[in-house]
Amino acid sequence: MSFEAAALAWLQAQSLPDSLARPLSYFASVLLLLILGLVLGFLVRGIIGVLLRRWAQKTETLWDDFLFDPKFFHRLSLLAPAVALYFFLRTLFPESWIWFPFMNKLSLLAIIASSSSFLNQLVANFERGFRAIHPESKLPLRSYTQISKIIVLIVAAVMAVSVLIEQQPWGVLSGIGALTAIFALVFKDVLLGFVASVQIHSSQVFKLGDWIEVQGQGVEGEVVDISLNTVLIKSGDNSTFSVPTYSLVSGTVKNWRTVAENSARRLKISLPFDARSVVAADEVLEKSLKEKDLWVLPQGSPPEPWGETNLEVFRHFCQQKLESLPEVRKENPIVVRILDPVGKGVVIEMFFYTTVTGYPEWANLQSRLLSAFLGASREFALTIFQEGLPR
């Protein structure tokens, strides 16, 4: 016998008319159901939740501190009454009650909604805990958690529809199959973002903390977040760019990660000289340079039949200077060459690799070398080419 039937019998025994006793019995059953739900929710959130949080704070494990947070028990306190509603429904009401099918569906929908909310909160807590416990990790965790939440919501939606139309979930899925093209169009960005996230992680195109440059878009900076649909990039001026994830896989991305991994960053210096200042190094210039230890032609090199030029002597000086610097990698090529004059003067171009990979330090080294070579060029009677000056 259900609680409603027992309440009705008791009210009728009190000589109440059936027209009054039956509504009161249903009202008492609904009221009891609400009270049970509220009490159960309070027990989960106010008592069990508090005790478990205190226990988690005393343990050495950090995971339970993030999993058993207040939001976790709040979602659980919504799930518990929904489950209680479903199981107590048959105890409190007879199945012949006109509102029983509606209440049964309502309880199932409440279980589905609260379960999906609880699972999504569990996934969010796991992500938050993983980031706090493993801050050095470069995994695109946001993409995976978003995919997990979407899967939970899709499963919940299919189950909710199956409850409403009173069919098995497989039957609902077979009906949805006819709408595949529409769903593919609606969730195009989500699908493309998911595929791109998998490709980014599997091929290590880039990861959190990498400094990348998106070719053709003027976007350059540090990757601070990788989500399902967008990648957040923080530029050098602290502004942020939100770039679609799929565009980074389908386009061209320049990654500076190997610079830090190999401790080698290329540095290039170009010095344009006025062609009219390039002359043969006479005895006076040679003597002056030797007195200052600036005449550094390679030992054993055959003399040029027409004599050395001040530009060639300066090139050898730059080569030796770079080879003696501790910041310059000797394992990589150190090239100092003279380019063809093309109307912008005669250019000495240097490119080499340095162990200084941080941008501020790298820029400081470049400025220091450029200033030093510009100052030294005057000792070789060379004049810097400056366009627009009278000849």
Image (cartoon, rainbow, N blue to C red):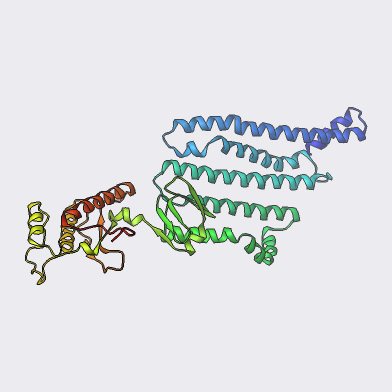
**Picture quarter with the C terminus:** bottom left
Choose between 153 and 184: the one closer to the eye: 184
For residue 318, side relative to residue 55 (left or right):
left
- Residue located at (53% from left, 44% from top): 124
- Residue located at (30% from left, 68% from top): 342
For residue 2, side relative to residue 300 (left or right):
right
Looking at the image, which residue sits at the far bottom?
Answer: 305
Looking at the image, which residue sits at the far top?
Answer: 14
- Residue located at (79% from left, 35% from top): 29
For residue 229, side relative to residue 305 (left or right):
right
Choose between 261 and 61: the one closer to the eye: 261
**In x, y percent, where is residue 147?**
55, 54
**In x, y percent, where is residue 387?**
33, 60
Q: Quadrant of residue 273?
A: bottom left
For residue 122, side relative to residue 176 (left or right):
left
Choose between 271 and 360: the one closer to the eye: 271
Q: Is residue 11 above or below residue 376?
A: above
Choose between 72 and 40: the one closer to the eye: 72
- Residue located at (77% from left, 44% from top): 103
**In x, y percent, where is residue 16?**
91, 29
**Picture quarter with the N terminus:** top right
Marker count (numbered): 0
**In x, y percent, where is residue 73?**
58, 36
